[in-house]
Every structure is written in C-alpha cells, then in structure tokens.
Amino acid sequence: MLQRLHPLLIVLLFLLPPAPAAAQPPDVQALAAQREAMARLAWMDGIWRGPATTQSPAGPHSVTQTERIGPMLGGTIKVLEGRGYNADGSTGFNAFGIISYDVASGTYRLHSYALGRAGDFTLTPTAEGYVWDIPAGPFTIRYTATLADGTWTEVGDRITVGRPPQRFFEMHLRRVSATDWPAANGPGPR
C-alpha cells in the first residue's frame, strides 16, 4: 500500500503552497544595494506643502499640494502620499506611490495610484531631482522634479514627437517638517 501512496504524496507536495518568504534567508547584498540606491532620494523625506496648478481644457485648477514621504522596510523602499486641497479645504487630488530599486535591472520603479488608475513607471534620479514618464498612446507625459534652494519644483509636460512640449502641471513645495511616517506606530507584538 505504501508503494501506491508514494506517487500521490509527490503530487500533493507539488500542490502545497511554497514556503513563506519569511522562511527564506534575506538577500543581504540586495538589501544593502536597495538601501544605497534609495539614499539618493532621501531629500524627499518629510512633509511638504505649496501651490500646484493643473491646466485642463476647462482652464487652470489650483490647489495647495502636500506630500508626505518616508522610508519603509528598513529604507529599501520609499512611500509617498500626495494630496491637493481645494480652496474650500476639500481634497481635489489624492495619490499614493511606492518607489523601489530593482537590483537586477539597476532601475528605480514608481508604482502609483491616482485618479482611479494605477501603473508602474521607470523613475530616473538626476543630479537635481528625478524624471519619470507615463506612456499615453500618441504622446508621453513627463514629470520632471528638481530641488533647489529648499524648493521642490515639479512640472508635467505632454510630449508629442515633432511638437514642443506642452506644460500642463507645475508645483512648488517647501518642506514643512520631518515625519516618521509610514514606519512609525505600526502594530506591536502585543
């Protein structure tokens, strides 16, 4: 009877879920490379606030933009939340993002959620800030951020081949304070 069960046991073992990630030893080299890569974006950490304007077919829409940004998972990723407040205090824009570094490809990735959409995009740090693009059919949306004299400026341009870029977004933020978000106040062991 044991000989008859043996093939069945083998099949069952393949059907079992893999061992949890926690059972795997950490990749110390990958974690160190991720922390080192994310250090290039440490200037973003904190709470930021300032004016932002988006141009649309209906005309310009201005908000007070805030960004709350901090490291998580031991500094291997960066978590971002952006909110744009209308003049009456209501939320006119809300976005959430995670920036990570892929050691194998040597690229930074931004996974973002905003306006009912989600996407994964390449983010490229620069000497002054960063650039990231959203492919959008016949054109590309390019966001370019710079940090100069304590001001985080970010602009959004619609890029179409053979045409000059069309600016549709601009924000100018100043750091309001440091923050221990999102890592602080997590659930404890009890």
Image (cartoon, helix red, strand yellow):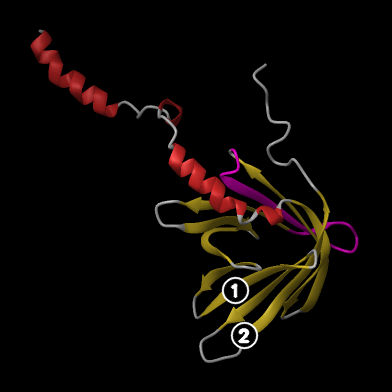
The residue depicted at 64 percent of the width and 48 percent of the height is: 79
Res. 154 image quadrant = bottom right
Q: Residue at x 58, y 46 (%)?
A: 77
144 left or right of 8 in image? right
Reading the chain from its start, which is encountered first: label 1 or label 2? 1
Label drawn at residue 142: 1
Q: Is residue 162 left or right of residue 146?
A: left
Task: Examine the rendering and report whether any part of residue 112 can be seen.
Answer: yes
Q: Residue 84 lies in magenta, yes or no? A: yes
Number of numbered tags placed on the structure image = 2
Badge 1 amino acid? Arg
Left or right of residue 126: residue 28: left
Q: Main secondary structure of the magenta part?
A: strand
Which stretch is magenta? 74-93
Q: Residues within 10 Å of mark 1 (few under 14, many from 20)?
A: some
Give the CA separation, mark 1 to mark 2.
9 Å
Image point (25%, 23%), residue name: 13
Residue 125's image quarter? bottom right
Residue 99 visible in image: no
Residue 165: mark in rendering: 2
Q: Indicate the position of residue 67 as horizontal and vertical percent values.
A: 75, 55
In front of the other: 174 or 80: 174
| SS at mark 1 in the image | strand
* Marks 1 and 2 close (CB-CB < 8 Å): yes
Type of amino acid under label 2: Pro
Q: Indicate the position of residue 84 as horizontal and vertical percent values.
A: 78, 60
Residue 9 at x, y percent in the picture: 20, 18
